[in-house]
Amino acid sequence: MTLMAVSRDQILACLGSVAQVFADNMDYLTDLDAAIGDADHGINMQRGFAAVKTKLAEVQDKDIGTIFKAVGMALVSTVGGAAGPLYGTFFLRAGQAAGQTQELTQPEFTTVIDAGVRGVMERGKAKVGEKTMVDALQPTLDALRDALAQGRAFEEALRMAAAAAESGMKATVPLKATKGRASYLGERSIGHQDPGATSSYLIFRTLAECLAP
Amino acid sequence: MKKLINNPQDVVKESLLGLAAAHPQTLRVHFDPQFVCRADSPVPNKVALVSGGGSGHEPLHSGFVGHGMLDAACPGEVFTSPTPDQILEATKSVHGGSGVLYIIKNYAGDVMNFQMASELAAMETIEIESCLISDDVAVDNSEYSQGRRGVGTTVLVEKICGAAAQKGMRLKQVAEIGARVNASGRSMGMALTSCTVPMKGTPTFDLGPEEMEIGIGIHGERGRFRRPLRPAHDVVATLAEAVIQDLPFRVGDQVLAFVNGMGGTPLAELYIVYMELAKICQSKGLTIVRNLVGPYITSLEMMGASITMLRMDDELIQLWDYPVATPGLRWGM
């Protein structure tokens, strides 16, 4: 069946899956963070999305904008560190862009992700190539925009986005960190995959798996 | 780990409960989300001052809540930034209709969380200004900050801006004074020992029995260099030189000299540091017009000290002298 628009219920289901993915990948993300950060990214993301899951029960009959804002607030109040405000900003800005709607068409979905990614870049003052989550998010956004411009189907756009996130994540391995905690390691950050880019990839991989299986 | 606590996970909460029990006339503490606010807040038509950061630096910030200083403080877990929901709730609770000034130490987590809170407050139509403190001359970037870290000058900004707000100055003016104090203040610290975060249970870093770290941060972040222990006069000269040359302080300047203890160094030793600093100031032609000596921005039980110098003018002296009534600083009333 062709995906014309993402419904509120699909988004709720996706967010539930994302929470499960962070529970399953807690140790993986924490191990990545132990190499170049302070070894808490997996624990923090798991805790944050566990709180999101609880929060979703309260807003499941609301519009998509309200749901994303609730996710953002749950993340900022539970994740901590830099990831809390960064992912919190992603969802708050996405929620503002979505507004009071019950579904998102492909152009609307792209606009929503655009707002979230720009929010993260503003908050963290990071750009591509600095070994941060932006290295996964920007290619994801580019893929969604390209797919839209090329008239690709929504499902294909989501798969392209997940593939772009994965390439962006892998491309952080040889980079030297110049933003965030890892930047203090300088040259020693080279050779390690960025945990923030990895968590961003996991979100978009889960979205694609849920919406475009 | 040897600490006088009950459970490591309850340290921040129980310490706040004790603070509130000891100073019921001055402040009250709120949980879920966690913040400390003036007992008489919101004060109508007064600019409100909100600060916060990781716990473990007491009396900063919670001990500076009260008349003539902060309206609210948002304590995070030990050495962990507070979250935007905490800051937002504190902001709403103390906003007296004349806007809120955020005083933020320059650490990536603090900056991002306070920025988010100011966006959320703006959605609730509360006017916010921010004052970012970045006075540590030791290093230009650190494990936790892009740019210089915020340390001792934070105490002075909270006192001076607190007085400005209490006297009825408007939000923009109070923010400008905060920026001026940050621009005129410089600090550097040193450590003789490490410190232990209660939840971690082991020292944050290793420092040999005959070593000290010059330029240490308030979370034990690396400074400029390590060297074998030296007498106080030698250590103070190193810190004071770095501080004086950086602004630079010049012959004829009036200064506030602040000798801060890191938590584990006795007051007697801090006075030795002050004696040495006063000698250096005299030899450089700097007049100490005000001073502060004691543990005010600490790093748990770390042994060590920091020096902060602030170039003063008549307005700053008046604001410094203005009455203050907080658990950590109290005079004139």
Image: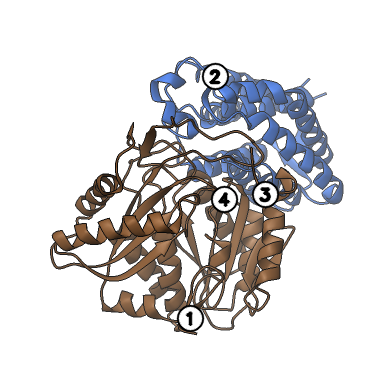
Chain colours: A blue, B brown
In this rendering, the label closer to the viewer, 4 or 1: 4
Image coordinates for residue B134, horizontal then vertical, percent? 38, 52
In this rendering, the label closer to the viewer, 1 or 3: 3
Mark 3 closeness class: few <14, some 14–19, many ≥20 residues within 10 Å: few
4 and 2 marks in contact (CB < 8 Å): no
Circle 2 marks a residue in which chain?
Answer: A
Q: What number is the disc on residue B4?
A: 3
In this rendering, the label closer to the viewer, 3 or 2: 3
- Which element type, helix, strand or loop, lies under badge 2? loop
Residue on which the image places disc 1 = B166
Q: Which of disc 4 and disc 3 is earlier in sequence?
A: 3
Left or right placement of residue A66 versus residue B140 in this view: right
Q: Vertically, is B291 above or below B133?
A: below
Q: Quadrant of the C terminus of chain A?
A: top right
Residue on which the image places disc 4 = B56
Question: What kind of residue is marked 4?
Answer: Gly
Task: Work out how far the residue at label 3 is from the one at label 4, CA to CA, in angstroms.
Answer: 14 Å
Q: Is label 3 on the same chain as label 4?
A: yes
Task: Work out how far the residue at label 3 is from the one at label 2, CA to CA, in angstroms.
Answer: 41 Å
Image coordinates for residue B257, horizontal then vertical, percent? 31, 63
Residue on which the image places disc 2 = A193
Q: Residue at x 56, y 34 (%)?
A: B203
Task: Work out how far the residue at label 4 is from the one at label 1, CA to CA, in angstroms.
Answer: 27 Å
Q: Quadrant of the N terminus of chain A?
A: top right
Q: Is label 4 on the same chain as label 2?
A: no
Q: Which of disc 3 and disc 1 is earlier in sequence?
A: 3
Question: What kind of residue is marked 1?
Answer: Gln
Left or right placement of residue A71 versus residue B260 in this view: right
Q: Is label 4 on the same chain as label 1?
A: yes
Image coordinates for residue B99, horizontal then vertical, percent? 53, 73
Q: Which of disc 1 and disc 4 is earlier in sequence?
A: 4
